[in-house]
Amino acid sequence: MKVLVLGAGAVGGYFGGRLAEKGGDVTFLVRERRRGELQERGLVIHSVNGDVTLTPKLITSGEAVESYDVILLTMKAYHYEEAVASIRPYVGEETMIIPLLNGIAHLPKLQETFGVERVLGGLCFIESTLNEHGEIVHTSKAHRLAYGEWKGGKTERIKALEELFAGANAVYDSSENIQREMWHKYLFITTLSGMTTLMQSSVGPIRDSQYGQSLTRQLLEEAAAVMRAHGAPIDADIEESHFQVFQQQGYKMKSSMLRDMEKGLDIEADHLQGYLLKLAEQYQVQTPLLQVIYNNLKVYEMKRAAQE
């Protein structure tokens, strides 16, 4: 199967690289600057699960127009429109699009653009970043990518994907209930990013502060209440299980959103917290802490825009 990975950053470069490492037919769709970096240095992965340097197949938007069997979308939500335009020429009748974005708001838009049958559910768990040389630095054991039919079950094409990913040095799991997994991750990432950005801190000090744990629980409960009002297929005890996961995070663990803010980069406030607030208003669910968190993120965006 021919695979196109949109981007070769900390997520796409890692999971696409691991697939290419095992001999998969993988091409990376990148910007011209990134293409130059990769041609000069190769696709370099520094990982606790094993280092590798690859000579990747690369194209830029509009080049070598042909359809691919699988397209992995690994961009941030604020690059959505640009990403959709760039992959459109490469989507064929049988193409499977697997988005790995955080959140859920992108799925209906992708399905409307490319058709429900072409868009699978997807998510990933990985703590990785790019260093100053454009090399991928992966710092924890977790490197899981999950995918599945949006309507559930296991089809022949999911079995084909299982065959494609088998043997790669990462965890590629097919899921028969990918919607539930995506909503569960959405709940956790909204809480983790919300608390760490509001407190401007890694998990440890938040956990150890006087009200840190109770506020974390409150945010989990507010977000979960919105999701249930919307009919999301989340578990009855998901707040408690996610709270326990939060408790087990490393002392210095930071959300990627906080790391982006520390670097003065764009963030996904509207895609994550903002989308939940729209649903909360629609279903008249009270979310006072979520509102504070979202407002903090929007103030950051305003200050950032004023500096540009």
Image (spheres, grey):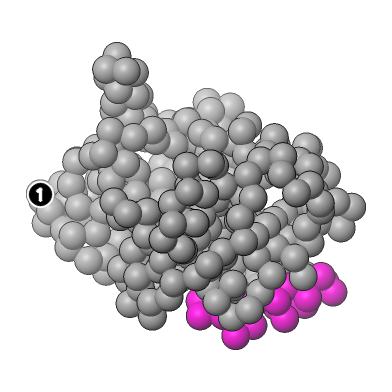
Residue 274 drawn above or below residue 163: above
The picture places residue 100, in percent across and down from the top left corner, at: 57, 54
Residue pictured at 29% horizontal, 14% vertical: 306
Majority SS type along the magenta span = helix
Residue pictured at 37% horizontal, 59% vertical: 135
Front residue of 46/62: it is 62
The picture places residue 40, in percent across and down from the top left corner, at: 44, 57
* Amino acid type, label 1: Gln
State yes or no: residue 167 in magenta. yes
Front residue of 82/120: it is 82
State yes or no: residue 307 in magenta. no
The picture places residue 62, in percent across and down from the top left corner, at: 72, 39
Highlighted magenta segment, given as a residue range: 155-170
Residue 60 sits in quarter: top right
Disc 1 secondary structure class: loop
Quadrant of the rendering where the C terminus is positioned:
top left
The picture places residue 170, in percent across and down from the top left corner, at: 51, 76
Q: Residues within 10 Å of mark 1 (few under 14, many from 20)?
A: few
Please state if 165 lies on the left or on the right of 287 as rendered.
Answer: right
Kindly give the residue lying farthest to the right in the view shown: 93
Residue pictured at 30% horizontal, 61% vertical: 246
Residue 230 drawn above or below residue 306: below
Residue pictured at 17% horizontal, 63% vertical: 251
Give the labeled residue for mark 1.
210
Front residue of 94/156: it is 94
Residue 131 sits in quarter: bottom left
